Amino acid sequence: MTQIPYIFNQLHSYLPRDKFDRLVKKYNGNAYIINYTCWNHLLVMMWAQLTSRRSLRDIETSIRAHSDKSYRLGFGRNISRNNIAYANSKRSVAIYREFAQEMMRRASKISIKDKSLKEIADVFGLNGFFAVDSSTVSLDLKKFKWSVPQEGYGGVKFHTMYDLLRSVPRMCLITGHEERDQTFMEDYPFEKRCLYVFDKMYFKTKGFAAIKLHEAYFVTRMKRNVLFETIDSRPVNGITVLADHTILFCGRWAKSGYPEKLRRVRYYSAEKNEVLDFVTNNFELDAESISLLYRYRWQIELFFKWIKQHLRITSFYGTSANAVMIQIYVAFTTYCMLAMVADSLKYQGQLYEFANIMSVSLTEKVYLRDLIDRYNNDDKKYGQDSEQLLPFSF
């Protein structure tokens, strides 16, 4: 008789085990290890994320409560907080960083969530829209002594590229909070005929040139002190779009970094009662769409808020830099896994709801489809709204 796997096993079956094993071999992650392997550690850390464990003792207690199942859940044997703490401090961060990147790449294949953006992409022949920003998690310098102090606090910053069409991260790089947002801009994985939205902290002409080199596009806010000359203009409605100019940078460094033509759109925001200046290398989009795309940048801020509230990335299970980075990369891996599972099941609700359903059912032996059908039937029974919602709802 066929055994139905635990929900937790069905979830982590979406992880590419072969890719993870290759990374472990590449970085010699299992050297001198007998019981608690890198794979065991990944699953324990994902369990901690899914069940919102607050400490190493909390993780150990929750697993001991299921000691008869822990081996079959994939945790291995002899799980203790000492083993978890040692793995957090000693295992190679590169394994978990590159695996998180692989999961983000796979999540970029899920179905498109935002139909309005899809229409714009189809009309103008674009392959995708991405918001780029960073978020900082503050750290207590007394506990995290390796962190560089700024204004009396330590911290880490995760630089993120976020897929606006599919509501999943495309890239995450963790650095100290002292690193400027634009430092690694030239090294981001830009893709052909995709459009990238930045705030003005990313105004870097060499970064713009890197995007242009990949035959991609960008939209960002114009800085006030940038010198430029207007060489052409387009007709505007004079109500929301106040100007649509073709410009060239005049300043020495700006011109050497990006010597080609750009487009400057001046837009009046009635909501903010403010005039906004956008700059882009796309001459095909209409001015209204450019302003709309910049407003979509707010989605990455909601994503940061979501993962900080619903995943464990603001309090940590260890105080070393290694432990902090592993925990954050595992959180991104967990988010992508949930998004992939929800998409494969064609789940139409909020990702927060989906994560909650999974978190309280991890040791159940029922097929994922049956679990979701059971939830949906109860949803209708109690007369709740079952229409599709945005992935961010608090």
Image (cartoon, rainbow, N blue to C red):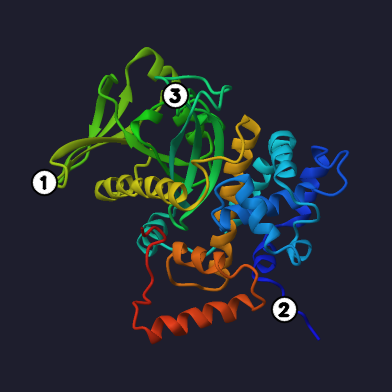
Q: Is 40 situated left or right of 332 in this image?
A: right
Say whether residue 224 is visible.
yes
- Ranked by sequence position, the earlier of labels 2 and 1 is 2
Which amino acid, by three-letter code, is at mark 1?
Ile
* Disc 1 element: loop
| On screen, residue 143 above or below 20 | above
The residue that label 3 is drawn on is 153
Residue 167 rendering spot, x and y as whole percentages:
46, 56
The residue that label 1 is drawn on is 239
Q: Is 316 situated left or right of 134 in this image?
A: right
* Disc 2 element: loop
* Disc 3 element: loop
Mark sitting on residue 4: 2
- Ranked by sequence position, the earlier of labels 2 and 3 is 2
15 vs 33, nearest the viewer: 33
User: Of all residues shown, which one is farthest toward the top?
Assistant: 252
Which amino acid, by three-letter code, is at mark 2?
Ile
Residue 386 rendering spot, x and y as whole percentages:
38, 77
Say whether residue 103 is visible.
no
Quadrant of the image occupied by residue 260:
top left
Classify mark 1: residues with Cα within 10 Å, few (<14), some (14-19) or many (20+): few
222 vs 19, nearest the viewer: 19
Q: Nearer the viewer, mark 2 or mark 3?
A: 3
Residue 186 rendering spot, x and y as whole percentages:
53, 29
Mark 2 and mark 3 residues within 8 Å of each other at the beta carbon: no
